[in-house]
Image: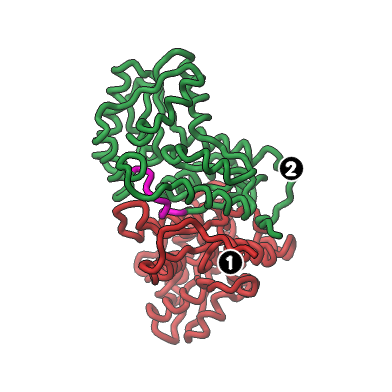
Chain colours: A green, B red
Amino acid sequence: MRRIGILGGMGPEATVLLMQKLIAAVPARDDADHIPLIVDQNPQVPSRIRFLIEGTGEDPGPVLAAMAAGLERAGAEALAMPCNTAHHFAPAIRAAVEIPFLDMVAMAADRARTEAGSGGKVGILASPAVRKVGLFDAALARVGLKAVYPDDEAAMLAAIRSIKAEGASDAARVVLKGASAALLGNGARVQMIACTEFSLIAESVAQSATVFDTLDVLVSAIKDFAQDRAEERPATAPQVAGP
Amino acid sequence: MRRIGILGGMGPEATVLLMQKLIAAVPARDDADHIPLIVDQNPQVPSRIRFLIEGTGEDPGPVLAAMAAGLERAGAEALAMPCNTAHHFAPAIRAAVEIPFLDMVAMAADRARTEAGSGGKVGILASPAVRKVGLFDAALARVGLKAVYPDDEAAMLAAIRSIKAEGASDAARVVLKGASAALLGNGARVQMIACTEFSLIAESVAQSATVFDTLDVLVSAIKDFAQDRAEERPATAPQVAGP
């Protein structure tokens, strides 16, 4: 089994959700069947929202690059990051390591292509920061799709912040479901949950839309990578590269 | 905020439960209020049960020592381990690092002393491996208390294994509740959940017993350690010590 490094803490609950989904994804008879991870649960990564939307605060890029390098040194054989918005800094992460970065945004675009065919619109249920930086626009354009977004950005941002502060709430569910219904009305039959705070309330979407969660796409990719050469590796402690 | 290294994966669900409890323990307005962790989620640590009860299989001690050293190198300022049984190997962990090990067993014995006074019996709801190695007997004797255990070891072990394989179940709850009632009948008013698989069903105990979970004792200790000099440290990436 190959060990995956997790750039986590954005937010901490989303990282825990990823770990739960990975446990649930493996039919296990005992502990040893589960996927080994090294998780940098770092809630102190500078706010992506503050940097990207408000234009203030520290650049998260160098912090994420340092986390990536630390995980590689600690024995990770690939990296994954359960935060859509932070994928804006994927180039800094890739530049910091030799190991592969399992890119949730690129993989989600491929999944959208499978669900939507080409030429359609894909609804993005995400932080306004994701829209502002064009994260999914570029990824979807590469597969012939167009990203569309909820109109009420303030409501989406408030819902995300409330989940970060207080956890899932009915108020946040109402916002997400309303945004999903509006996107459907706007022609986006296929939609993606593209914010790991919304992953915590992913069931609250328009019933007749085809909605997938980018976090689930990442779970599948982690599982596939970890198990790829399971038979070649003995059960060992983490490998720590050192001079 | 000080970063805690978690020797995890024993089992992976118990590690996730610890992380959830740490998130719930912090009143947070935003991500950055939460406790930073480096989690070695290593489900491939050799089976403690197989080594300690069955006398077969690899010694987990050297693997745990290597994990501890790796976490220290990755910037952890203290270590914690959400697995009671694995505390049998605490000496190997301590020997491998300079940073403190937050000893769940020793702290649970102190908590039992607070709850029970001195001279009483404390019921231990744990793996038979814990009884066999005398883990809590020694810790409780130091504070003037006596450990007592459920009689039906096979049922306890089967319940733990079923939780590791299939998650919490009603059958496991029945076993835990029956063991708690029997310990109460045997004079153990104060009891501790001392197996992180049982932490997942910790509500299933005798109602008139005073029961605490050793995992909750660890959560408090981690929070106290992490926040001790919160104001002295800026938000940064993990520090990776190098030569």
Asked if residue B66 lies left or right of residue B183, the reply is: right
Q: Which mark is residue A231?
A: 2
Q: Residues within 10 Å of mark 1 (few under 14, many from 20)?
A: many
Q: Main secondary structure of the magenta part?
A: loop
Q: Chain of mark 1?
A: B
Element at label 1: helix
Tell whether label 2 touches label 1 (CB within 8 Å). no
Disc 2 marks a residue whose amino acid type is Glu
Q: Which mark is residue A126?
A: none
Give the residue displayed 28% in from the left and 43% down from the top: A169
Give the residue displayed 61% in from the left and 52% down from the top: A31
Give the residue displayed 58% in from the left and 69% down from the top: B87
Q: Nearer the viewer, residue B34 or B176?
A: B34
B33 in relation to B93, above or below:
above
Q: Residues within 10 Å of mark 2 (few under 14, many from 20)?
A: few
Asked if residue A52 lies left or right of residue B137, the reply is: left
Whether discs 1 and 2 lie on one chain: the answer is no
Magenta region includes residue A46:
yes
Give the residue displayed 58% in from the left and 46% down from the top: A96
Q: Position of residue B206 (x, y in %)?
A: 39, 65
Element at label 2: helix
Residue located beneath label 1 in the image: B85
B111 in relation to B34, above or below:
below
